[in-house]
Amino acid sequence: PAPLVAGVRGRRRRDTVSKRIATKFANGLRRKLLGDGAPDTGCPLKLFRREDFLALPCFEGLHRFLPALFQHYHHALINLDVGNRPRLSGSSKYNNLNRALVGLYDMTGVIWLRRRTRVPRAPREV
């Protein structure tokens, strides 16, 4: 299967201290529970084959868990360092609490999906 290429934003972000702490905690919890090894699932850059993406179960918040789901279906993960661009206009409609609640709810669903979904074994050379 083709890999998922996921962007990893650089360290030059200007987040508040509370957002940095919340992000570090959430990424650590996600990596521990899902074992996806993705350092930054919040980076919007994700490259994948269309047919591979369409084979995934569809749910709200899927974008947060693409590395874990692609790996569950035997795709490799390639992390690619990218620059971080600041927001040009507008403001986020999230705060740390509602981001955490939505993320935990969705992560519970991903854990359930991975346990309940039958995936063929990865092909191997003979």
Image (spheres, rainbow, N blue to C red):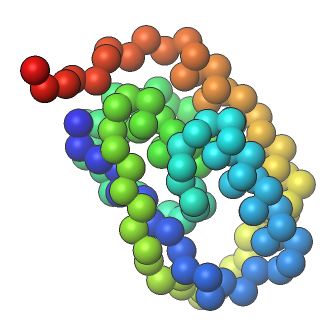
> Is 4 left, or right, of 85 in this rendering?
left
> Is 98 left, or right, of 124 in this rendering?
right
Image quarter of the C terminus: top left
Q: Residue furthest front?
A: 126
Residue 103, compared with residue 33, is above or below; it is: below
> Is 123 left, or right, of 62 in this rendering?
left
Seen at 68% across and 36% down, the residue is 33
Seen at 68% across and 41% down, the residue is 32
- Decide if residue 87 is in sight here: no
| Residue 113 percent across, percent down from the top left | 57, 21
Q: Quadrant of residue 5?
A: bottom left
Seen at 51% across and 39% down, the residue is 68
Q: Quadrant of residue 88?
A: bottom right
> Is 22 left, or right, of 60 in this rendering?
right
| Residue 95 percent across, percent down from the top left | 84, 63
Residue 13, compared with residue 28, is above or below; it is: below
Seen at 42% across and 37% down, the residue is 71
Image quarter of the N terminus: top left
| Residue 74 percent across, percent down from the top left | 34, 32
Residue 87, compared with residue 109, is above or below; it is: below
